[in-house]
Amino acid sequence: MISDELKTVILAALNLEDWDFTETTLAAEVPGWDSLSHVNVVLAVEKHFGLRFKGAEVLKLRNVGDLQRLVNSKLAAQQ
Amino acid sequence: MGLSFTSLEFCIFLGTCLALARSLRKVSAQTWLLVIFSYIFYLSFGALGVLVVTLSAVAVFHIGRQLGSLSDPDIRNRWLWAGIAVNVGPLAFFKYSAFILDNVASVLQPVGVRFTFTHHPVFAIVGLSYFSFSGMSYILDVYYEKIDPTQSISEYVCYLVFFPKLVAGPIVRAGELLPQLRKGLQFNAQDFEAGCAYLLVGAIKKLVIADQLTGHVSMILASPQQYSSFTLVQGLLGYTVQIYADFSGYSDMAIGCARLMGIRLPQNFLMPYSSVNVAEFWRRWHVTMSSWFRDYVFLPLEIGGRGTRNANVRIARNMIITMLLCGLWHGAGWNFVLWGGLHGVALAVYQWYAGRRQRRLQQAAGSTFRFGTLAARLLTLSVVMIGWILFGTSTLASAFTYLWRILTWAKDGIALGSPYILPLTAVVFIAHLLINKDRNLIEELGSYSVPTRTLTYACLLLILTTLVPSEAVPFVYVHF
């Protein structure tokens, strides 16, 4: 399940008012989420959650569910 | 050279393949049959390519399995680099070694070191750039865990050598083709009709449009210093239409061949000359190649460099690097590199501009016909056409002469008249202007009534049979 916190960060990075994100949502399905704004989303998520992803971790992401799991695993590792 | 999609021999080849494939029930037998027919097809282009693609396929299949079974990041990295080397190595040797050595010799000559590489062997392998990129995307997708590696050698070889897309694309990803191969070939009336429609439209684009233009266009591009500026403008318009009709015609025919067996290949051309900016042009021109560069070059550069403080500089740099490589992919020559550089700079400038005026540009990207949209289309087309001068001429000097003579409106030189260039240019540009660029008319045709479809196919057949020139010309993009 996609957390409201992650959803808010993604929406702000994409300048979107609202979007129904699910585990299987692909970037290409979301208006304005292209190869250029992808970096903005990643940077916004890193900044908001105080995380730093490896390049390979970002390139492995297939959908929003993968991003949520990456954030969760990084936050768990920090604790 | 090789079996051409537009030859009678290929029709017999395709018909035989379809008849045999239809008689087979087992999926594995169908896959092997496609491998055998793909090898027969590729053998017609020369034995060396068959050898290279086979060695590449065996190596990449093995590396893919290793990447799928290992978890240690360091060892996986080593296999990844091995996979990249297996794909880049043949490209570097067969396509770029002469270019690299010639340029090294030119650089060293002023400092007194003289090399001559006149005996350097150059072997042109048709389709090398395409199957190398397919192999590379497979390795990267397995490495990034986007797909599971296939455990069947026949499946992987079939993905790599599948004859409709082998020599000039579309560059299909393994994630798109392998699941369809596993499901088995599907023979049904709808796919067969759609396949025939793609083949028919592709053949018209190639034979009726591109081949009619080739004669005059090639002469003008070969020696621009001999022709008047009006003739040069005609030549440029003709080349702009020829390269589109030739390559999109090939792609349509490739999609059509695969569709006859129920296999869906990705679309490669989406009315590119109707684009309102260069970024949109690259989402519509040679889509499978531009998305390849986006996913495997631009995106890793962007992600890796995301710490850079100035985002505009980072994006511009990455766009230019990506497009320079894209230019080099098309051919080992400075014309192609500069062509890529031109598009890279144009993309960077557009991106900077778009960032400042986002809302207005989003409005302009719509399909409605307005003066602003028309002006944006003309500006985009102008940039693209300047690029085609670099693409179509053989040397940088020739390209600059071409452009200079147009810009200074040189009246000396031969005034060559072609009965085809202006009418065919008008047909293609008006089609791009009037047809909704997001529609796929070939796919839509299947939903129309039987009389409408019958009439449409009859008209297309009539055009094809009455307007085909006497001499067939090889497809342009096969040489890349």
Image (cartoon, coloured by chain):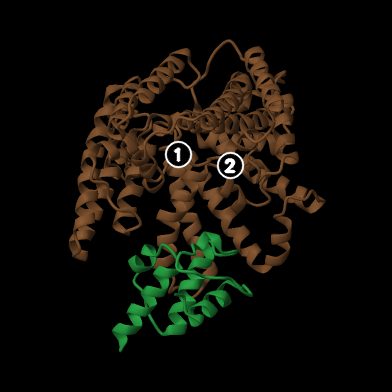
Chain colours: A green, B brown
What's the chain of the residue with tag 2?
Answer: B
Quadrant (top left/top right/bottom left/bottom right) for the N terminus of chain B = top left
Residue B26's spot in the image, x, y percent?
Answer: 30, 32
Residue type at tag 2: Gly
User: In the image shown, does B347 or B33 lie closer to the viewer?
Assistant: B33
Q: Secondary structure at mark 2?
A: helix
Up/down of B301 relative to B103, above or below: below
Q: Is residue A68 left or right of residue B385?
A: left
Quadrant (top left/top right/bottom left/bottom right) for the C terminus of chain B = top left
Q: Residue at position x 52%, y 79% from top?
A: A9
Q: Residue at position x 71%, y 66% from top?
A: B359
Identify the residue position indicated by label 2 in the image.
B387
Q: Is residue B436 left or right of residue B294?
A: right
What's the chain of the residue with tag 1?
Answer: B
- Label of residue B330 in the image: 1
Q: How crowded is the residue under tag 2: few (<14 C-alpha within 10 Å), some, or many (20+)? A: many
Residue type at tag 1: His
Up/down of B306 relative to B4, above or below: below
- Label 1 or label 2, whichever comes before in sequence order: 1
